[in-house]
Amino acid sequence: MSLLAILVLAAASSQDAVQLTDKSQIKELCEALRAQPPEADLDPAQVSAARKAAQARREEAAGRFYRVEIPSKGFSFGRYRAHDKQIELDGDHPLRAIDDMLALDIEGTNDVSFNARPEQVTAWSAEKRGRSLRLVVVFKPSGEPCAGNDAAESWRIGGQARSWELVGAQGVVASANDDGEPVGGGPRQMRVERVTLESDGAPQENEGRARLSSARAALDRCAYGAQRAGKLVLSFSVQDGRVRDPQVVLDSVRDESIAGCVARAINGAEVGGSGHGTAAIAVQ
């Protein structure tokens, strides 16, 4: 799947999905999914109209997509498949969101996996412990209408997912489609191909690449959210031997968030020399 397609799907998910964020929305959704005509002495015409209204309300609620952010404590990872470089979600327990008031029974949760290198799994686990990693699911209600009630402040909704996203401090770090299959071309890495400075005479390629070694960890974090390969070329000035004001001048990755992350990652990196410089960095 191309980056453009991924961005279109993400935009669609944000635009047409109802954001579930608080108790009142859960209550309203459950009431709509369980809507029944009022129990009262009505004439046949009123009964028919009430039934149609209740059915229309149920169908409208069940026909929409909903977006829920599940906090770190509301989901768990399953096994890591080293051969495939993919990590699974643990679907043995419902996903829990909105201050633990909402339990989601999403079909096929056990089949959801994300592309992940071992170092990414380590980083995500650390973010999860720090409660900065979130799971975002866009789903449509299905199965049992809704369980729970307002008195207990607890509800349970079943559904079918349209998309899954892991969101960390750097933004979206991994995605999966409606079948739970990883989206994108696989785990990415950053490779510094060339760094040149005006003050260089005849720079050696290996020495040039080594100049950004201090930014390696930050660059690797930028690769987490990259959905396609490509190359970034940045220009910058050097003050006191450090990178200042890096600007992306070529971006075949075509992802502003990745380009911005790379620029921030190398800003301030010690490179020596003086004048202006350029760096070519590949996303692989």
Image: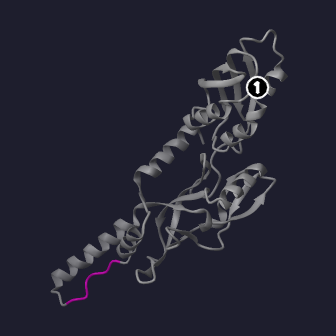
Q: Nearer the viewer, residue 249 or 273?
A: 273
| Outermost front residue | 240
251 lies above or below 202: below
Magenta region includes residue 68: no
Magenta region includes residue 37: yes
Q: Local crowd at mark 1 within 10 Å, few (<14), some, or many (≥20)? A: some
96 lies above or below 15: below
Kindly indicate the quadrant of the structure image that contains residue 109: bottom right
Magenta stretch, residue numbers:
35-40
Residue at image location 63% in from the left, 44% down from the top: 225
User: Is 30 positioned to the left or the right of 170 in the image?
Assistant: left
Q: Is residue 142 visible?
A: yes
Q: Is residue 108 visible?
A: no
Q: Nearer the viewer, residue 105 or 282?
A: 282
- Label 1 residue SS: strand
Q: Position of residue 41 (x, y in %)?
A: 18, 90
Q: Position of residue 129 (x, y in %)?
A: 68, 61
| Colouring | one colour
Q: Position of residue 262 (x, y in %)?
A: 64, 33
Q: Position of residue 213 (x, y in %)?
A: 78, 32
User: Dot 1 corresponds to which residue?
Assistant: 193
Residue at image location 17% in from the left, 87% down from the top: 42
Amino acid type assigned to the residue bearing label 1 in the image: Glu
User: Is 213 positioned to the left or the right of 34 in the image?
Assistant: right
Q: Nearer the viewer, residue 192 or 216?
A: 216
Which quadrant: the N terminus? top right
